[in-house]
Amino acid sequence: MAWAGLWLLLGIVSLEFLLNAYAKYRHLDSGAYGMFMTRRGWLWLHLAGGLTTVLLGPVQFLTQWRRRNPRLHRLTGRLYLLGMLVAATGATGLIATSPAPFAIRLAFAATALAWLTTGLTGLVAIRRGAVDRHRRWMVRNYAVTLAPIIFRLSLPVAITAGLAPSPDLIAALLWASWVVPLLVCEAVRRLARRWRSATPPASRDAVPLPGAR
């Protein structure tokens, strides 16, 4: 139940953030479009796909729901991966047409590549019947899914701390927004595995940690 609550809380926080972020693109005359105006098709693809993955992601990790609704889990999983592909397509178009410095475009491209790699690895795993491997990779994939949110939260913090919003800072934060969460996921997985090895079965929590198997 604790992990279910954590995933739901994460989904709610992400939804609130996205609604605020996406609201500025509701009107075409919004100043938020800026350099995106001529590339708004790519932007809309990216936003629509990203919203789908952020919202469906936490539901996929609810253990009891997944066990009771396996068909629905598979359906929402397919929709999640479809959203990822749509968002990645939009991201590719934005990167290819971006006037941003190379370091920033490279960081964005690396994020998209990490997203696709973790997601497709998870898909291949479940197609082969490797459920535990699938689960681990999808946890990693969702960590990368949250990279845009983490980046947009960390940038104002860095500026408040006195760092100038330079291309180098933006590129560094883009890399950190998915590398750090992946490292945290791996650390949690290793700690959980050690805990499960050291704890007698009778005293273990009935709900496994995500990616701990």
Image (cartoon, helix red, strand yellow):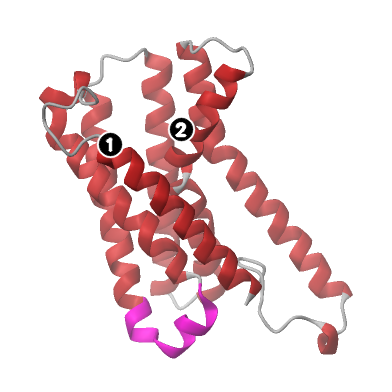
Q: Is residue 84 visible?
A: no
Query: Does 136 lie within the magenta span?
Result: no
Above or below: residue 157 compared with residue 61: above
Mark drawn on residue 91: 1
Q: Name the residue: 53% across, 79% down.
A: 63
- Check disc 2 and report the residue beneath it: 152
Closer to us: 146 or 161: 161
Question: Percent from the top left, x then y, of residue 54?
Answer: 39, 55
For the stretch drawn in magenta, the main secondary structure is: helix
Which region of the structure is painted magenta?
62-73
161 lies left or right of 88: right
Q: Name the residue: 49% across, 13% down.
A: 165
Query: Does 65 lie within the magenta span?
Result: yes
Closer to us: 178 or 50: 50
Question: Percent from the top left, x then y, of residue 18?
Answer: 36, 46
User: Amino acid under label 2?
Assistant: Arg
Residue 122 picture quarter: bottom left
> Going from the N terminus, do you reach mark 1 or mark 2 first?
1
User: Amino acid under label 1?
Assistant: Ala
Question: Percent from the top left, x then y, of residue 153?
Answer: 51, 34
